[in-house]
Amino acid sequence: MAKKAAKKSAEAEPMKLFYIFYNQERWDNWITRLHESSFEPGPDPDEMPEGFRVLYSFGMDVTLSALKIVKLYKNERFSKEETLDRLSQVEKIVLSDPPAGDLTEIVESLQLSLLVLFASCKKYLDGNYRTDLKALVKEGRAKVENEMDAALDIAAEIGANVINGASCCAKFVKDDLDQPSLFDEWLIECEAMNEAITSLKNFDEVAGDED
């Protein structure tokens, strides 16, 4: 009887995995790619400059890495504490001091948009967030100019809904904005999270190393 109970207990424990989600070398490699990329327009005016394409991929790589951690939590591979610890490790790398020089403002802009990624993951894990997306977008836009921290918390509520399966946020992003607000940038990141979650639908079906 004791052996059966021990076996059942062992089977109930989450399988420990050795995924490599993010590291300093990976971040540095992206910075190098940005250094080597041109942000000047090419001969085709409809084609996005190489630097901005790399920047988009850079941000999506971070987004995927963070959401893989949350996906493994949802699959009961990690406890809440393990999940928060792993997210913190990625966040520390991503929000480190940007490189000095021409890329400083570009990387800072990326870091600002990614604030909502980590805040959303934490909000989802906490479980305390509202679900009326339209009302949240309206409230966030009203606060972003004078209450940035409050606006980020609202954007994180939106992101938590996205992680939980809500469809967002393309319909709330205004295409005609010449200079989108920081809240709009966070909505764009929430939409990137939505795309990333879709691509991770089958992630962790088979245990193994991921980078």
Image (cartoon, rainbow, N blue to C red):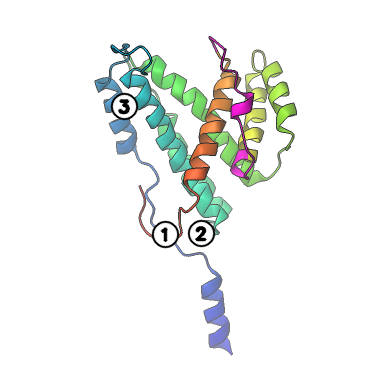
Confirm or deny contact between disc 1 and disc 2 (CB under 8 A): yes
Instruction: Tell me where the magenta segment starts and ends, as one range.
Output: 162-179
Residue in the image at 45% along x and 56% along y = 204
The amino acid pointed to by label 2 is Arg
Would you name the residue on which mark 3 appears? 31
The amino acid pointed to by label 1 is Leu
Res 17 label: 1
Nearest to N terminus: mark 1 or mark 3: 1
C-alpha distance separating marks 1 and 3:
28 Å
Q: Give the quadrant of residue 184.
A: top right
Question: Left or right: where does residue 104 sit relative to residue 135?
Answer: left
Would you name the residue on which mark 2 appears? 77
Task: State the predominant SS element of the stretch in magenta.
Answer: loop
Nearest to N terminus: mark 2 or mark 3: 3
Q: Is residue 112 above or below residue 123?
A: above
Q: Residues within 10 Å of mark 1 (few under 14, many from 20)?
A: few
Give residue 115's position: percent from left, percent from top.
Answer: 53, 29
Extreme residue in the bottom direction: 1
